[in-house]
Image (tube, rainbow, N blue to C red):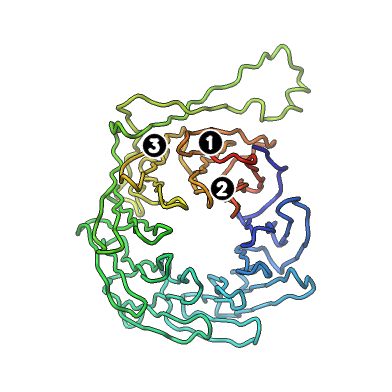
């Protein structure tokens, strides 16, 4: 692996363009666009205030920068650097801004979710959509960019509206059988819309494109319910993570439960490999180093090094008992992600914050457990290969593949701590984001698996 130098960034705002050619970063009120290969600055744009949200258009020709406190959105063009667009929502305010799939319309959600405003960059036309619901995931576009599903709340009832993105006409409008709708998400093939209720009630509803209710799934009642939901890339599986520390897998034919994955405190599954991170501090002879050498060599020399060891079974996983009297208790499956080939599912259970679980979707069983020394902040699959990257808020990058695990020290000075990771769409590099810095990690050519 090779690492780039460190660059500044603000608010974790760093995005690779959809075509993979550009890297956009925000530094306070400036937008910096670099060539992703050479990291040379191609464009530098100055916004009217500090940027809190940034997003590429689908064709990589425009960048949207939102300043929510001022109710402003500015759009910049890569082809015509002198051109820009400014959208001012005025006194009605702004809480969310995003591109439509065609990259020529912008959807702004106003304060108190009074309405969604659709702005056209081509015709300057404006459309309004009333009654958007303030929830976990109230808007979702189908993968092909043809349809938009919008969660609505009117007359104390939940509804879903399906719009055609070409001209924003209403295709379907139907009431959902939810008490307090929490989110909507299209299957990757765009045939099924998953709708789920708030954490107070375990309920998933599956609708067809024309609004027909295909199936309803509820695992239990009278307890905290759904915490996360994820479709497999093939749309064959729907994974539902809940507060009871289990993941339930539904199949796409009958929408019944295929299996459920537990996250036990004691692992004795003989088909699973448990990798435990073990730390050790490097031994440096102080008498051999002058004070100047101590300073000049920086903190990287004295960083705690780590490696993975395979633990013999049974293994006791560290569990933190949550405070159930407080809101949003740290318990249950909050993060799930399928690998690009549908073969693996990675999960994280919040009261086992230092552990990532990897499940084999072919034999529907536990494959690997990664126990870290610190709480896992973020994990993400390589978009091209079955390879998982994760970070824990220290100066290390961790990688898992079916071949094994590896811990890599990030050789950046100044105490660079990795808060989140993002793969390049080619899978050849990773963006490592710190609190106010970023660097790129380049995989070696032909490095298909972790060795």
> On the image, which quarter does residue 273 sit in?
top left
Say which of 80 and 64 sits in front.
80
In the displayed structure, does residue 107 sit left or right of residue 416? Answer: left
Kind of element beneath mark 2:
strand
Kind of element beneath mark 3:
strand
Q: Residue at x 78, y 56 (%)?
A: 41
Q: CA distance from mark 3 to mark 2?
A: 20 Å
Residue furthest out toward the front:
446
Quarter of the figure that contains the N terminus: top right
Look at mark 1 in the image and give the residue it sits on. Answer: 450
Q: CA distance from mark 2 to mark 1?
A: 17 Å
First along the sequence among labels 3 and 2: 3
121 up-or-down from 234: above or below: below
Of the two numbered discs 1 and 3 in the rendering, the one whose residue sits closer to the viewer: 1
248 up-or-down from 29: above or below: above
Of the two numbered discs 3 and 2 in the rendering, the one whose residue sits closer to the viewer: 3
First along the sequence among labels 1 and 3: 3
Quarter of the figure that contains the C terminus: top right
> On the image, which quarter does residue 27 sit in?
bottom right
Say which of 111 and 451 sits in front.
451
In the displayed structure, does residue 122 sit left or right of residue 261? Answer: right
Look at mark 3 in the image and give the residue it sits on. Answer: 369
Of the two numbered discs 2 and 1 in the rendering, the one whose residue sits closer to the viewer: 1
Q: Are marks 3 and 2 in contact (CB under 8 Å)?
A: no
Residue furthest out toward the top:
287
Q: Residue 137: give x, y in percent of width and height.
A: 43, 66
């Amino acid at each position: 692996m090779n690492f780039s130098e460190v660059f500044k960034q603000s608010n974790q705002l760093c995005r690779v363009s959809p075509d993979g050619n550009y890297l956009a970063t925000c530094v306070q009120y400036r937008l910096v666009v670099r060539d992703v290969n050479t990291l040379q600055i191609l464009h530098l744009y100055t916004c009217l205030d500090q940027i809190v949200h940034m997003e590429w258009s689908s064709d990589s020709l425009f960048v949207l920068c939102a300043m929510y406190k001022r109710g402003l959105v500015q759009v910049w063009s890569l082809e015509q650097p002198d051109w820009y667009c400014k959208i001012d929502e005025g006194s009605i305010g702004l809480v969310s801004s995003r591109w439509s799939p065609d990259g020529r319309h912008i959807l702004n959600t106003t304060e108190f979710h009074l309405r969604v405003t659709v702005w056209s960059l081509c015709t300057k036309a404006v459309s309004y959509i009333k009654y958007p619901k303030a929830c976990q995931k109230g808007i979702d576009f189908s993968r092909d960019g043809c349809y938009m599903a919008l969660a609505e709340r009117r007359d104390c009832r939940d509804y879903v509206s399906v719009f055609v993105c070409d001209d924003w006409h209403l295709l379907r409008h139907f009431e959902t059988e939810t008490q307090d709708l929490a989110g909507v998400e299209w299957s990757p093939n765009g045939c099924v819309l998953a709708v789920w209720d708030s954490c107070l009630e375990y309920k998933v509803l599956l609708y067809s494109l024309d609004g027909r209710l295909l199936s309803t799934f509820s695992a239990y009642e009278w307890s905290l319910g759904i915490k996360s939901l994820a479709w497999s890339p093939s749309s064959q599986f729907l994974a539902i993570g809940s507060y009871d520390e289990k993941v339930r897998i539904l199949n796409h034919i009958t929408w019944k439960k295929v299996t459920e994955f537990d996250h036990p405190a004691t692992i004795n599954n003989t088909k699973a490999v448990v990798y435990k991170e073990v730390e050790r501090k490097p031994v440096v002879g102080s008498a051999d180093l002058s004070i100047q050498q101590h300073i000049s060599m920086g903190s990287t020399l004295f960083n705690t090094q780590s490696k993975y060891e395979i633990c013999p079974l049974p293994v006791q996983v560290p569990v933190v008992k949550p405070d159930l009297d407080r809101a949003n208790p740290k318990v249950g499956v909050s993060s799930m992600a399928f690998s690009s080939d549908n073969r693996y599912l990675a999960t994280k259970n919040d009261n086992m914050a230092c552990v990532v679980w990897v499940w084999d979707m072919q034999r529907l069983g536990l494959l690997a457990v990664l126990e870290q020394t610190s709480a896992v902040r973020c994990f993400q699959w390589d978009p091209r290969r079955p390879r998982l990257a994760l970070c824990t808020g220290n100066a290390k990058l961790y990688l898992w593949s079916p071949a094994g695990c590896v811990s890599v020290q990030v050789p950046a000075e100044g105490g660079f701590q990795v808060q989140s990771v993002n793969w390049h769409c080619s899978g050849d590099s990773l963006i490592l984001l710190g609190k106010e810095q970023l660097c790129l990690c380049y995989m070696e050519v032909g490095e298909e698996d972790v060795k």
